[in-house]
Image (spheres, rainbow, N blue to C red):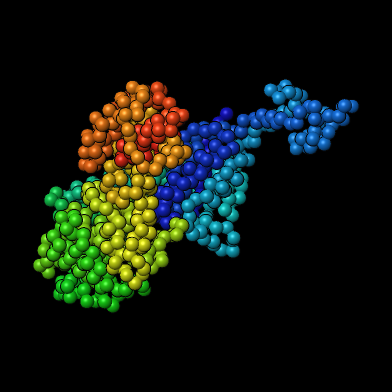
Amino acid sequence: MSRSLLIEVGTEELPPKALRSLMEALVAGIQSGLAGVQLEHGAVQGFATPRRLAVRVAGLVERQPDIRIEKLGPAVSAAFTTDGTPTPAAQGFARSCGLTDATELLHVETDKGPRLCFRETRPGVATRELIPELVQAALGALPIPRRMRWGASRVEFVRPVHWIVLLFGDAPIPADILGVRAGNRTRGHRVHAPGQLVLTSPESYEAQLRDAYVVADFSARRDLIVAGVTALATRAGGTAVLDPGLLDEVTALNEWPVPLLGRFEAHFLAVPREALVSSMQEHQKYFPVIAADGALLPVFITVANIESGQPELVVAGNERVIRPRFADAAFFYQTDLKTTLAARRERLRTIVYQDRLGTLYDKTERLAQLCGFLAPQVGADSRHTIRSAELAKSDLVSAMVQEFGELQGTMGRYYARHDGEATEVAEALFEHYLPRHASDVLPATPVGIVLALADRLDTLTGIFGAGLEPTGSRDPFGLRRASIAILRIFIECELDLDLKPLLIAAARGHQQLGEPEVLANRVLVYVMGRLRAFSEEQGISTEAFLAVSDLGIARPLDLWRRMVAVEAFAKLPEAASLVATDKRIANLQQQQTLDGGSVDPALFEAEAEHALWERLGAVDLRLQDLVSRGDYSAALDVLRQLRDPVDRFFKDVMIMADDAALRRNRLQLLAALRARFVAIADLSQLAARTGAQ
């Protein structure tokens, strides 16, 4: 027999940005708990609204399966004396099994002879008895950074708890969860249906709540918002900007979503659209609307958590809220336009960047010097690059950015255009903050690429030099994010540059913090460590990373190309044989010391030696050309041609010959072979991946 189970935790308003993740974590915790106590079940569905987290489990069995226990004890010969008296070993084993008499134990035959055995079948525990502890554990494991207490209780949770539902079939499970007695009573919408609601079954949960003005399903509520917002935007002659993060947040703020269309005066559109959009999205949780040409329309869509009899009053209230914010933005923008970025730069002298790294003005000076070094290597205009470095942080002291911090760089671009700066400079002021997050776009212009790299290289070397590198999970200066950004720019913008000289150049801007090369090496190790995590996120195996990571290469693009080629190579049928060869040669080289010398074909005795040497010579020029051009996939394809002569060599040739000259020559031949391998990667690292012995 099976029934459905409903678990609901009713609280005060939950943090909207965390609601979805809390729901998903609770579902995972319940599933894990059920598996841990061997309770079979059907589909598991999560629900979340501003005031509740819930999970419904379909087809949950009513009790655990019976558990058959079998324990083997000591050998029978060691369990009893000659007169049949149980030995201490037998008595101890009996007590560990809950028995008082060792003679109650069974004797069973094993491959090691007769042994004592305890067998027992324990009936499974009823599901109703297991659920409370299971739910308590799942709630305790939720990812809540800071739990709170309320009243005189010592109970802690993300928000104060007001009710708990534990409903198994049509019967509640009595239990105390988070200081509240569980039952079958929930609550509807705070305004439209504030009273208690008796749930009749887990299956009726959604329908009963919908009758009480609550859409319990997070995804269904999100879909309702999308449909309503889209329809209103179409009616207004445009398309709603449906940011996924904002959608989730608005979904988490409403139990009964009602989209409403508001308007604002068209003259506000003279303000940069990013400021208006930021104000609508970040501060008011409104959805902007754009025309077919991408221009912002003087309308917005808000989502109310109430079905008002006078929606026009709700709209008017929201319009009254947005106008002052837009008016402030317009004032800040017009005020900022009165001062150029160049003049504003002087104010950076008064703003400390970091105690040991000077002011923001000092940082722009370092950036200008570093950009002058980087620009020719990337093919960027040095004059524009240095100018963009000098102005890079000037918009941070503008009124707009101080009010809308997320617009740093964006406002710099607007102000640079207004000041008559070159287009390349204006774009770089915006692009040097890219990528802002893991999935963000990269800078697209050469000047923007240089400034983006210089900014992060200066930050990394400066913070490391100041002794503030990340420890554990702490990374207050965002150095992990900066490292990943550098790697992405190198790889995705195809900059085939050596990272170490760039780090040394950046470290020279921090001479007061130590010897530049030593500092650069510390940062290089850190950035390359991030390459491993980045490559794994992109589907590159650990083995492929290890195969290239110890080659002493500091060119991220080159390393990436090698990893991609090795990852593809590892999947080929020929890979196992060549990997096994490389591993075998590596092992031989560890055991045998070669003090120079070269291969002497005159010492070859076996035809297999000649064949391998000739094939090496035949592929050598082609291999060197491909490696020099960074075409590692083609180079590995060339190495595949060595499989047959290599296999014949190991089959027909005694490498460790008694004759010292022959032995040395054969080891030199294998060393020459491995040199071709490691010119691309240490293929021996793929042994576990390919099953090579």
Q: Can residue 212 be seen at all in this image of the molecule?
A: no
Q: Is residue 621 above or below residue 291?
A: above
Residue at image coords 43%, 33%? 660
Residue 5 screen position, x and y as percent: 53, 38
Number of on-image labels:
0
Q: Can residue 144 be seen at all in this image of the molecule?
A: yes
Residue at image coords 76%, 28%? 75
Residue at image coords 20%, 74%? 344
The quadrant in which the C terminus is found is: top left
Q: Which sits in the foreground, 221 or 131?
A: 131
Q: Which sits in the foreground, 667 or 622?
A: 667
Q: Is residue 200 above or below residue 272?
A: above
The quadrant in which the N terminus is found is: top right
Quick check: 332 left or right of 88?
left
Quick check: 626 left or right of 462?
left
Q: Which sits in the foreground, 316 or 43?
A: 43
Quick check: 685 left or right of 226?
right
Q: Is residue 445 above or below residue 199?
A: below
In this view, the residue farthest toward the right is 83
Q: Quadrant of residue 93?
A: top right
Q: Which sits in the foreground, 559 or 331?
A: 559
Residue 618 screen position, x and y as percent: 24, 30
Residue at image coords 18%, 55%? 378
Residue 373 screen position, x and y as percent: 21, 62
Q: Is residue 130 above or below residue 450?
A: above
Residue 92 screen position, x and y as percent: 79, 37
